[in-house]
Amino acid sequence: MTSVADYLSSGLVIVDPALRVLAWNRWMTEHAELTPEQAMGQPLDKLFPDLPTATLRRRVKAALQLRSPSYLQPSLGYLFPVALDRITESHFAYMQQRIRILPCQEDAQTAMIVVDDVTAMREAEARAAAAAKASRRYLELLDSNVMTLAIDAEGQVTRASSALLESTGWSTEAIAGRSLDELGLGKRDGFNWTHGSERSERPMRRPEGEPLWVRVQHARGLEDDISSERHLVLQDISLQKKIQFLSERDALTGAYNRMKFDQLLKTALSAHQRYAHPFSIVLCDIDHFKRINDAHGHLAGDAVLKQFTTLLQSQTRATDQLARWGGEEFVVLLPMAELAEATSAAEKLRQAIVADHWPAIKQITASFGVAAHQRHESADALLDRVDAALYKAKENGRNRVYADETRDESPLNALSNEHSEPVIGLPDLPD
Amino acid sequence: MKMLVVDDSRMARRILIGMLPEPLREGADIHQGVNGEEAISLWREHRPDLIFLDLTMPVMSGFDALVAIREQDQNTPILVVSADIQARAVEKVMAGGANGFIDKSKLEAQLHDNLQRLGFV
Amino acid sequence: MQQLNEDQTDCLSELINVAYGKATARLADIMGAFATMRPPRIAVIDRERFRQILQQACLAAGSCYLARQIFRGDVSGEVVFLLDEISATNITHYLQAQLGPDDTDQDDVLLELGNIVTAAMMRELSLRMGARITLGEPELHRLITEPADQTTASGAFDHVIKVETVIEFAEQQVQGRIFILTHGHCFEWIRQALDRVLNDLPN
């Protein structure tokens, strides 16, 4: 073989159609551990017992007939074995070879087999494939366990993870194209996409049944510059919400419980402190409730309480907060309401109760005490006043509304001044 | 001199006719057909001195036309011209009575050889 | 996008017909695979249409195989041999039965088939058009339909000659499609070559 061939880092073997060796370069000598003298004139399949002989013959024939290269991908990964000495772990025990068969230019009946060592490349491929596989498994894990949504520039859903579809009952087709808003998750603009790690709690609409309470967070790091797709991660907080609900609410009627009301009252006071927001309290009590219980039984009594609550809720504004104060006592906090407004609201309630149909019990009435929060008044003081007002209503015949008309609180008039004008001590004016 | 050239490809017919030696081309009545059926009817009508048949044609193949013509006429020279040049096809055609098989990819050379052999050149 | 006129299309059609015939003959010779072939239909299409065809083929059969080879020379481009999954499996079984004992896997067989058909066809075609080209190493790709669009990395080639034929292997019909992808200026070269062939013809 020419000396040029001996400098190549590829194996070169020239063969005839029967695979007899006509030339053999130095690379082949070194790697096949056969000298040219040993190899020349021998058919390759005699030199290498595991050779895919029929296939190789065919590829040689193809190259010669096509006058064009043909290729071989040996199923073993190599044409002839060259054991690898490796210190670090390797995927392969033998050199991985790439085989090309080229028709010789000069002679139409001989072909040149070129052998290249592609072990490094195959190892890289194997590593990449393993990494891709691990990555895929991880993604599958995420997809089945984490609820995620991908949305486009218009805030419409493009993809949803399997976990989300399963938890909510949405199908891929049904959820695709829906806007965040439609799903009860807010607007795309509402999210801070550059900094957001804020999380909001939302009732996510479901195709059937009650909404699912979720905490929604923007998942950063998945954006690319080209698409305007964004990703949200949702956490199911329905259990927490349930616990929260149960801890805040009266089990029987669903109204807030007293503990919650105390909180709400505190909030109203802070709002007053910061923004001077007024608010009022209506305290109401079902008249002769014990009689109802005694006459019709506790179940009937419970039913009345439930109906009462429903009625109160329907007759008050969305912002008004209703709580069950005691056995048959209810309290309503009316934010931003002054005394007159609260009083007429109470009156409206009173009438509604009278007018409503109470099954089995012909008539229900209730008494109402109303008080408007005075500047800098404490919670306790306010509650005392509204309690006193209710008492007055009861005393004066029940089924009525009594409003505590104290305007201003001054230490001089802390007691009993129910009758309107702030009384301020003024020195007598001289004539 | 009458010739029949049958091939469903207009271009193939044009190429073949173009490859004929000029005196032959200019001096002959050349009839063209697009399938085996036309080959038979044109042969019957014109009784050509030489027939060129392509193999793969719709309606009736060149091979079927060859066999049909040969049943009644063992003398008129018929040359099969085809792109399909597998050994099996060639054997079949020669056994069917063709006088020669011309490989379209070597049209010029093989056409000349065959014409010479048949005495047209 | 350029198109060929009727004469040029007919001429290319016939050239490809002959070239494809050569390819099947080689297949028979080399792989013992006897195939009868109907004359191929050709069309000149654009990149978008090419992608659509790939997608449709994958959708119909679940996945398909592409054997691709680049070619360079007077004309440059890429030849793509498309086989749907079902056809590929059928052909492979047939060929493996023909070929005998060696343990050849499906990929290797398809590559061999692709290489023979492509090399034979392109050699014949280039000879007839007076072009010198060399083919690169074939690659086999398996395409599965995915929602994201598959880029077949043939972005630069905007003119595609689609060659469609039905090959019959032992009573199984296979839709064999070959696409010759090329640039606009190479396509122009092809057009001129066709004109040269046409001009050599009398009348």
Image: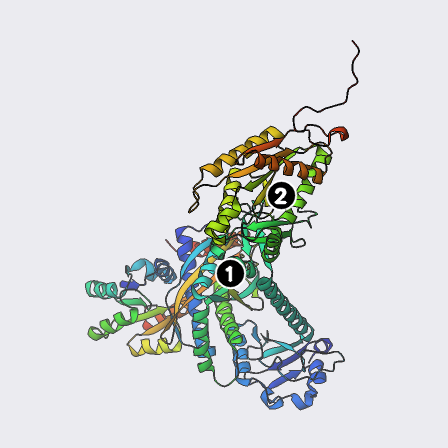
Q: Residue at x 46, y 71 (%)?
A: C88
What's the residue at 57%, 80% (across, down)?
A75
Above-or-below relation of A24 to A289: below
> Taking A379 as reference, is A109 left or right?
left
Query: A141 or A339, which lies in front?
Result: A339
User: Given the image, on which type of amino acid does mark 2 rest?
Assistant: Gly
Give the letter of the chain under mark 1.
Answer: C
In the rendered image, which residue does mark 1 sit on? C130
Q: Are marks 2 and 1 in contact (CB under 8 Å)?
A: no
- Disc 1 crowd rating (10 Å Cα; few below 14, some 14-19, many 20+) is some
Display coloring: rainbow
Quarter where residue A400 is shown: top right
Rendering coords of residue C68 (x, y %) = 54, 65
Label 2 Cα crowd, 10 Å radius (few <14 / some 14-19 / many 20+): few
Residue A104: image quadrant is: bottom right
Q: Nearer the viewer, mark 2 or mark 1?
A: 2
Please state the horizontal and vertical placement of residue A3, each as a whole percent of the image: 73, 78
Position in image of residue A145 (x %, y %): 59, 63
Against A119, residue B9 (above or below) is: above
Q: Quadrant of residue A52?
A: bottom right
Q: Which residue is mark 2?
A: A190
